[in-house]
Amino acid sequence: MILALRALGVGDLATAVPALRALRAAHPGRDLVLAAPGWLAPLVDLVGGVDRLVPTDGLGRPDPALGTPRVAVNLHGRGPESHRMLAGTRPGRLLAYTSPEAGHHDGPEWRDDEHEVDRWCRLLDWYGIPADRTDLDLRRPAPGGAPTGMTVLHPGSKIPAKRWPPGRFAALARELAARGHRVVLTGSPDERATAQRIAEAAGLPADAVLAGRTDLGRLAALVAYARLVVSGDTGVAHLATGYRTPSVVLFGPVSPARWGPPPGRPRHRALW
């Protein structure tokens, strides 16, 4: 069994897709198990190649369900916590960035300024596993009742510094609607009130507010069949990349050189 750890969010999983597929190709006869938050299950299904998801929300004592892997791969980070968690599964081999604090002296050196996709491809390349950084496409789901051809505005982010002002989103929504776009606003339940204020200021109907009303699977379908996506530096932007849906990503303090759309995909524009 091959175990990969990526206990983070939507964008984190999306940027690890090339690495996960490289692991799948390198070990065709073994189960590929992903340790990641359970709520990511709909997206894991769209990545393909992962045989089993073990819900993992923290970096404490490893879940016995992880078993004893032949190979454990740290796609989570470079810190001692993630290294020690994987070492606790007693793998035959640990593939990870060097971490003297965790007693792991194998592996390449970490680079702070590296694009997140390249980071994990380089890790595997160092261990002799070729990874294609352009292999980011996600399987297109059935619409499943999600509206198609919409222009999706996603104003929220867990990190306040990454949020574009609501008034700017309202002005953008108003202009896009005037140009014939069918605009909807997405977000978490906690972001629903903000989305409602934006919709009211933009003159959008109440049913344009989908924030808090879409689970991850339906959000993926909405983005997959959208006309356009406009968001901050958050998971929805990576879904747009995975589906080659035209997108504009509004970056804040973090450079798009680290988390932005990859080169060679002109349908995605990063503004910083």
Image: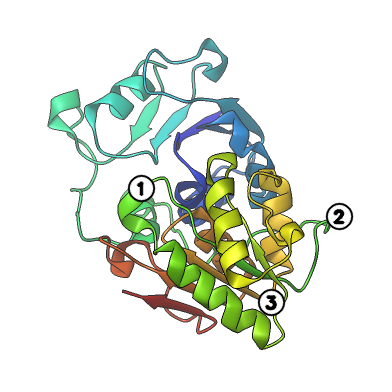
Could you give the CA–CA distance between mark 3 and mark 2, rounded to whole angstroms? 16 Å
**Which residue bears the numbered disc 2?**
145
Mark 1 / mark 3, whichever is N-terminal = 1
Above or below, 263 relative to 47: below
Q: In the rendered view, how is the structure colored?
A: rainbow
Viewer-closest of 237 and 162: 162
Numbered tag placed on residue 21 in the rendering: none
- Residue 238 rendering spot, x and y as whole percentages: 51, 60
- Which three-letter amino acid code belongs to the residue tagged 3? Arg
- Which three-letter amino acid code belongs to the residue tagged 2? Gly
- Which three-letter amino acid code belongs to the residue tagged 1? Ile
Other residues around mark 2 within 10 Å, as few (<14) / some (14–19) / many (≥20): few
Element marked by disc 3? loop
Could you give the CA–CA distance between mark 2 and mark 1, rounded to whole angstroms? 30 Å
Residue depicted at 37% across the width and 29% down the height: 93
Residue 150 placement, left or right of 167: right
Residue, far right: 145
Viewer-closest of 68 and 153: 153
Mark 2 / mark 1, whichever is N-terminal = 2
**Which residue bears the numbered disc 1?**
159
- For residue 261, what is the image quadrant? bottom left
Residue 121 placement, left or right of 138: left
Viewer-closest of 204 and 27: 204
